Image (spheres, rainbow, N blue to C red):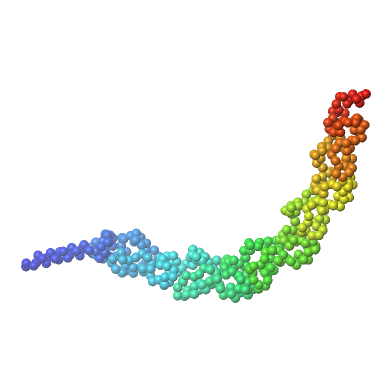
Amino acid sequence: MRCLPYIICFVLIFAFNSIAQSEHGEDFDYDCELCHEPVDWNVIPEQIKFDHNSKFELTGQHKSLDCRSCHISLVFSKVKSDCISCHTDLHQGTVGKDCSKCHTSKSWMVEDINGLHQQGRFPLLGNHLTAECAQCHTRYVDLYFEPLDVECIACHSNDYYSTQNPNHVSAGFSTDCQNCHSITASEWSAISVVHDFFPLIGGHAVSDCFACHEQGGNFTGLSSECISCHQVDFNSAANHLSQGYPTECEICHNSTAWNQVNFNHNNTNFPLLGAHQNVNCSDCHESGFAGTTTDCFDCHQAEFNATNDPPHQVLNFSHDCLECHNMSGWVPANFNHSFYPVDDRHDEINCNECHSEPNYQLQCLSCHLEDFLDEHNQGDPTDCWNCHNAHDWSIGIPRDIKLQKAH
C-alpha cells in the first residue's frame, strides 16, 4: 500500500500529459470544437467549421476530396500547398513545378494551349497555330516538353538545305528565315525581303528576284551601281558612248523610267542662267559631257570675232565676256568705265569715236586736239580737266581766258 500514492501520481501525470499534447502537432492552436463533437471526438465532415480558405482554398475537384486524400497524418502542418507535393510530375521537371501555369483544379486538361504559348518565348503565329504539338515537341506522347530553340533554323534546317529555287546554300542566304519569310504567313512562298539597303521602288519594284540576281547564283555582293546592271541600256542609248556620258545613271535618270531625264546643272560648277537655260545640250557639249570648258570665250569666239560694232578683235577687247556682257543677252553691254568716268556728253558717244585704235591712251587731247588748237594759244596747259568738265566746255574757263576770247 505504500506504493499506491506513487502509482496514482504517475497515472495523473500521464493523463495530464496525454490531454495537454495534441495529435495535430505542437503548433496546432485551433479550437477542437471546430471539427470535433463536444460529446466525443467523432468528426463529421459535413459539420466541420474550420475555414479551409485561410490556408488553402478548396476549389474544383479539391472540394469533393476526402480529407485523408491530402491529410495522411493528423499533423496538418505537414501538408504543403504546392501541387507537386501531392501530384506526380508527369512532365519530369521540363515545365517547372507550378502546375497552375497550365492546369486548373477543375481538370488536368489544358484548355488554352495557344494562350499559354503567347505568354512564352515562342508565340504561335501563322502555320504554327495549326501545327501538331508533336511536330516540335518530339516527346509529346510522354508529356516530356524539353526546352526548344526558338530560332527558325532549329526546326527548319531541312527546308533551308533542301530548297533549290533558289538554292539557299549556294546563294549564301542567311539562316535567319525571317529576313525573307514572315512568321505569320501560311506558305514559305510568301516572301517579304527587307531590301532597305537598295530600295526596290519605281522600275526596281520587281517580283522576280532573278531579274537582278542570276538564277541559282549568289545573292550577296551584288553591286548597287546602276551601270553594273544597265550597261546594255547605256551602250544602246543615243550618244551616251560617243559623247562620253558619265556612267552614274542617277545623275540624269531616276528609278521610275529612263525617259524621265532631269539633270540639275545647278549642281555643277556652271549653273545655267539667263540665255543658257534655253540652249540645247549638244550646242555646248559637242564632244561629250566630260571636261566641258566653262570659259565664255571658248564657246563664243565666233561671236567675238564677228562683232564690228565695236570691232572686238581689232580693238583687242578682253576675252572675258562678262566684263561687258551678262548671261541674259549680248545687249545691252555694260562696261565699267570707272577708271575714266563716262558721264554727261561722253555717255552718248559711240565707243569707236574714242577707241579708234587698239590700246587707246587716256588723254583728252587724243580726242579733242582740234578743239584745243581752235581755242587755245601755244603754251596753254593741255590738261583739259583743269578748266573744263565733261558737260560743257565753257564752264570753268578762267576769266582772263574768256576776255581774250572776247577780243
Q: Which image quadrant is residue 106 in?
A: bottom left
* Above or below 303: residue 150: below
Image location of residue 115, percent across then percent down? 49, 64
In-front residue for pair 171/62: 171
Image location of residue 1, percent across then percent down? 6, 68
Image quarter (top left, top right, bottom left or bottom right) of the C terminus: top right
Q: Is residue 106 visible?
A: no
Q: Which image quadrant is residue 97 in?
A: bottom left
Q: Is residue 298 visible?
A: yes
* Above or below 271: residue 96: below
Report the residue that reaches farthest toward the left.
1
Number of callouts: 0
* Above or below 161: residue 318: above
Image location of residue 81, percent across then percent down? 36, 64
At 42% from the left and 70% from the top, the residue drawn is: 93
The reply, left or right, for residue 198 in relation to residue 145 is: right
At 31% from the left and 60% from the top, the residue drawn is: 49
The reply, left or right, for residue 328 in relation to residue 171 is: right
Q: Which image quadrant is residue 83 in?
A: bottom left
At 92% from the left and 33% from the top, the residue drawn is: 373
The reply, left or right, for residue 356 in relation to residue 39 is: right
Image location of residue 290, percent across then percent down? 76, 59
In-front residue for pair 153/299: 299
In-front residue for pair 58/225: 225
At 87% from the left and 24% from the top, the residue drawn is: 400
In-front residue for pair 214/228: 228
